[in-house]
Amino acid sequence: MRTSRNYFAAAVALLIEIVADDGTHGYGYSDLFTRAGEEPAPAGAIAVEIFDATLRDGNPLEIEPLVARLEARLGANIRLLAGFEMALQDLRGKLLGVPVYEMLGGAVRSRVTVMRMVGLKRPDEMAEEAVQLCRRGIKALKLKIGTGCDEDVERVRQVRAAVGEEVFLKVDANQAYTFEEALRVARQLEKFRVETFEQPLQADDWEGMIRLTRESPVPVEADQTVKSVEDAIRVIREGAAKVITTSPQKVGGIFRAKRVADLCEAAGMACIVSNVGGSRLNDAAACQVIACSAAARLPCEVGEFERLTADPAKGLEVIDGEIQTPTGPGLGVDVEF
């Protein structure tokens, strides 16, 4: 998968297993980003050390204090924190015999409309990939752009012409544009019924995001700008986006992703729960958040596990462009080694 800033050929992750005294297993998935300094080998060593120091004698039914202790020790290792919290959520749900969404307030939906990503390629290649996805029942697409205004508009034009008017389209520039470029592109994308414009500017360009949100005819979506619950509060308060993207991996766990979604609901904003290519375990966590979050009313970025080979998790599939929310205890998927 190519974006304007990166190329991903493989999913790099750490699978976390926590076993309760009665033998119940809880699983978590840390989607490690090398560019963020989270490497598998150091993360694995840290995980063992942290478990011994923080969780070994803890009560898995009392997740909040355990997560607070983890956060104090893990610091900037947000994705490792997310993996631990996911495993604790899975374990607690299994011990109680309920899915995670029941522990977070109950489901407001039973299915997730899948939004699949189309990586950065030539316009005609992206159009062909989009058509292939739609033939498999996908109803929403996220197009990677960010190499130049005219070429990016042509990518969207060709994809829209190829898939028709009914498919949900959004674009993601991955911070590639200046304000002037982003506004120029947004004004041209409007006629192709682009639903949202994800992270057109640098993550820390708050002034630009606020101004673009006011002037863009296509709703601006904040992704990299929102790395925490506190960032979500600032986006809402300052009007730096119309839509917020969150994920358990990005903000440090299921609890925090749900808090971001709840903030969006309170502010009357839509929230997209996202995921990159990785295990079904990761998508199951995202689906649990989506299931109990009223603000997650747009198609969400799950289903990329279809790109992965040798996934240890089973029990989650895309059928006719949707994923049925797992209803089994915990995250609702099985892990097989």
Image (cartoon, rainbow, N blue to C red):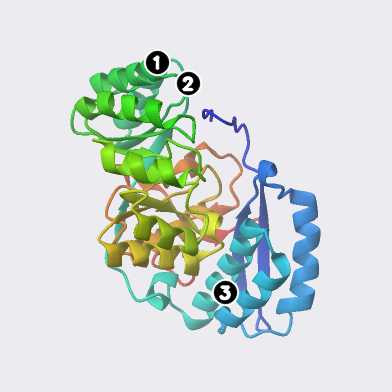
Element class at badge 1? helix
Q: Earlier in the sequence, mark 3 or mark 1?
A: 3
Which picture quadrant has residue 129?
Answer: top left
> Mark 2 highlights which residue?
147
Kind of residue sitting beneath label 2: Thr
Which picture quadrant has residue 158?
Answer: top left
Element class at badge 2? loop
| Residue 296, placed above or below residue 299 | below
Q: Is residue 290 visible?
A: yes
- The Cα–Cα distance between marks 2 and 1, rounded to whole angstroms, is 7 Å
Given contact means CB atoms under 8 Å apart, are the residues at marks 2 and 1 in contact? yes
Q: Observer-nearest residue: 181 or 76?
A: 181
- The Cα–Cα distance between marks 3 and 1, rounded to whole angstroms, is 48 Å
| Residue for point 29% across, 60% down | 295
Residue 331 screen position, x and y as percent: 48, 65
| Residue 147, placed above or below residue 221 | above
| Residue for point 60% across, 33% down | 8
Residue 330 screen position, x and y as percent: 49, 71
- The Cα–Cα distance between marks 2 and 3, rounded to whole angstroms, is 44 Å
Residue 54 screen position, x and y as percent: 73, 77
Q: Earlier in the sequence, mark 2 or mark 3?
A: 3
Instruction: Give the crowd class for mark 1: few <14, some 14-19, many >=20 residues within 10 Å.
Output: some
> Mark 1 highlights which residue?
151
| Residue 333, placed above or below residue 126 | below
